[in-house]
Each structure stands twice: as C-alpha cells, then as structure tokens.
Image: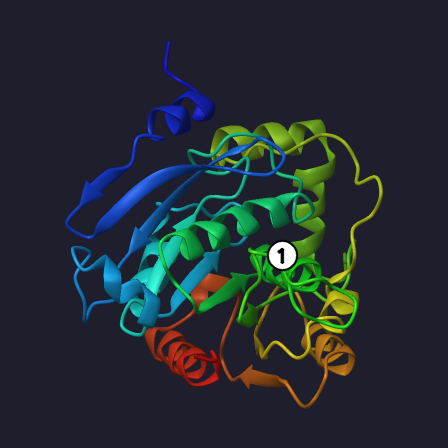
C-alpha cells in the first residue's frame, strides 16, 4: 500500500540536508504535521548559519491546490532567494502535509509554525508573502500574531506582510472561476475531484465560527508594513478586492500595487514582479 501524506510527512521529520537547503516536518499548535523547506539566500551558504541573524527570511504561503513541490512555488522561492533566505511549506491537506484543508481558516496555524521555524533558525527579520488563499492567510496571521492595536506580538509575528491576489471577503462567487472553486469545496464530488486530481484534501465541515475576514484583518496589521499586490486580469477576484483591503488598512504603513496584465497568484507571477516584491521586502523589513 502506498503511504499517505501523514506517513510521508512523519518520515520527513528527520531533517534532511541538501545542496540547496534542508527540509523538515513541522508540528502546528493544533497537532498537524506540515512539510517545510529552507533555502538560503543565493549570496550565502547554508553552512554559515550565523548569517541567519543578519539575513531576512521570507516565508511563502501558496494558493489553494499549491504545495511545496509545485513548480510555481519553487520558481517564486528561487526568485526571492536573491534577496533573502526562503521558507516554503505545504498547507494542511496539500502535498505531503497532513490534515485536510480548511481553505484559509486553520491554515493560520501552519503559517505560524513556519514563522516560528524561521526564528528558531536565527532570523531576526521575517516577512510573510501569501498568494490567493495564502494571501488571506498572511493577513489574518498578521492580525492574530502581529503587533497591531488589537493583537499581541507573539513568537510567530511577521515583520513585513505581502498579500498577492488575495480575496477581501469570504464566500465570493462573482466570477466563473470562483463558482467552480466553490463547487469543488462544497460538494462531495468536487472534494473527490480535488483529492484525486489536485492532491488537495478538503475538510467537509463548514466554518464554525466564520474566521475574521481578510478586510477586517487588514485593519489590524499596522504598524507592520503591508503590501497588497493584484493583477488587473485576475480571473478570480476583481479589483474591488484589493481596494477593499487598502480601504481598511492604515495608509501610513500600507501600499497597493495594481499590476497591468497580471493574472492570478504564483502561477502567473513573472520573475520581474517577484523581484520587485523582494526589493520592497528588503527595503521595508526593519533591522
């Protein structure tokens, strides 16, 4: 019998060192095993761990149906490694991680585990970058673990936040792409298609309670620097979504980029855009 994701991730709990970094299995606060990888900045060697303290880390949160090994996330990690050490991971229910996807709710715990790992490696400065579903997760994570007026700073706090192609509100069905996605998430047949065809295992239960919305979270992030990036050709979320996020955020610490010709999330992000985001993170992540 082929081992399932839980067994695969449990086996990877013994850290493995490779020429490009190392991989581990992280345990979230609610007991889910998450596969994760650390890639050092191109300008330094993994054999020089003391450099972590002076090198920022970028933690990447992929979109729904993404995973650590997907080409788009690996391409993004390679681009960001020009600017910082990079940590990638698979959300619960995705790739080799355990559990089942809650489509942006409990995934905050997965991101928190990855940020804690970055700090355990010695990084004093940690930025989070999320794509699509991951974008909603980095916003909620910053609100819950950050240093805003209504949130206490924790050991999982981010120093800088970037949300790419993120939704502003839950249950949005205004585009054909989102109507198809809701069918996948809410119907038994759709969840079967997701598990077999997309290697994404979705939890069948509805949210209870409904989590803090991305827009509500955006209003709780300041003074942590926030960048919202969105494409004018996004087939999932039209431009009212990033504008809603910005209307809730503190204009003194938040910035909006509307990218011409850009589609959706990590699959459509060109190297030039990823490079500019990396430069923005370097400039806005406090020492």
Q: Relative to 280, is 18 on the left or the right? A: left
Rendered location of residue 257, percent (x, y): 56, 84
Name the residue tied to disc 1. Answer: 137
Quadrant showing the C terminus: bottom left
Residue 232 visible, this angle: no
Q: Secondary structure at mark 1?
A: helix
Which residue reaches farthest right?
209
So how many labels did they put on this image? Answer: 1
Q: Relative to 194, is 213 on the left or the right? A: right
Within-10-Å neighbours for mark 1: few <14, some 14–19, many 20+: many
Of 141 and 167, nearer the camera is: 141
Rendered location of residue 139, percent (x, y): 65, 64
Q: Is residue 273 above or below residue 203?
A: below
Of 43 and 190, nearer the camera is: 43
| Residue pictured at 68% horizontal, 77% vertical | 222
Which residue reaches farthest top?
1
Quarter of image, res 43:
bottom left
Quarter of image, res 230:
bottom right
Residue 180 visible, this angle: yes
| Residue pictured at 67% horizontal, 90% vertical | 252
| Residue pictured at 24% horizontal, 37% vertical | 16
Of 276 and 270, nearer the camera is: 276
Rendered location of residue 214, percent (x, y): 73, 63
Quarter of image, res 281:
bottom left
Which residue reaches farthest bottom?
252
In this picture the colour scheme is: rainbow
| Residue pictured at 58% horizontal, 31% vertical | 31
Q: Is residue 237 above or below residue 5?
A: below
Rendered location of residue 185, percent (x, y): 68, 39
Quadrant showing the N terminus: top left
């Amino acid at each position: 019998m082929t081992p399932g994701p839980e067994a695969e991730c449990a086996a990877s709990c013994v850290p493995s060192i490779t020429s490009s970094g190392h991989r581990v299995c992280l345990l979230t606060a609610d007991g889910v095993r998450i596969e994760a990888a650390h890639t050092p900045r191109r300008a330094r060697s993994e054999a020089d761990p003391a450099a972590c303290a002076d090198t920022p880390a970028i933690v990447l949160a992929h979109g729904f149906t993404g995973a650590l090994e997907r080409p788009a996330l690996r391409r993004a990690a390679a681009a960001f490694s020009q600017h910082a050490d990079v940590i990638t991971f698979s959300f619960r229910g995705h790739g080799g991680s355990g559990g089942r996807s809650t489509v942006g709710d409990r995934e905050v715990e997965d991101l928190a585990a990855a940020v804690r790992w970055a700090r355990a490696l010695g990084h004093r400065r940690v930025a989070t970058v999320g794509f699509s579903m991951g974008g909603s997760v980095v916003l909620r994570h910053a609100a819950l673990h950050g240093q805003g007026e209504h949130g206490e700073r924790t050991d999982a706090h981010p120093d800088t936040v970037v949300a790419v192609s993120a939704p502003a509100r839950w249950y949005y069905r205004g585009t054909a792409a989102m109507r198809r996605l809701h069918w996948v998430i809410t119907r038994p047949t759709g969840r079967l298609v997701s598990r077999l065809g997309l290697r994404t295992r979705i939890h069948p239960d509805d949210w209870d309670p409904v989590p803090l919305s991305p827009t509500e979270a955006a209003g709780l992030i300041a003074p942590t620097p926030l960048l919202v990036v969105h494409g004018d050709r996004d087939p999932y979320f039209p431009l009212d979504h990033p504008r809603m996020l910005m209307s809730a955020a503190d204009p003194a610490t938040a910035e909006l980029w509307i990218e011409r010709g850009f589609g959706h999330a990590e699959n459509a992000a060109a190297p030039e855009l990823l490079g500019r985001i990396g430069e923005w993170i370097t400039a806005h992540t406090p020492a």
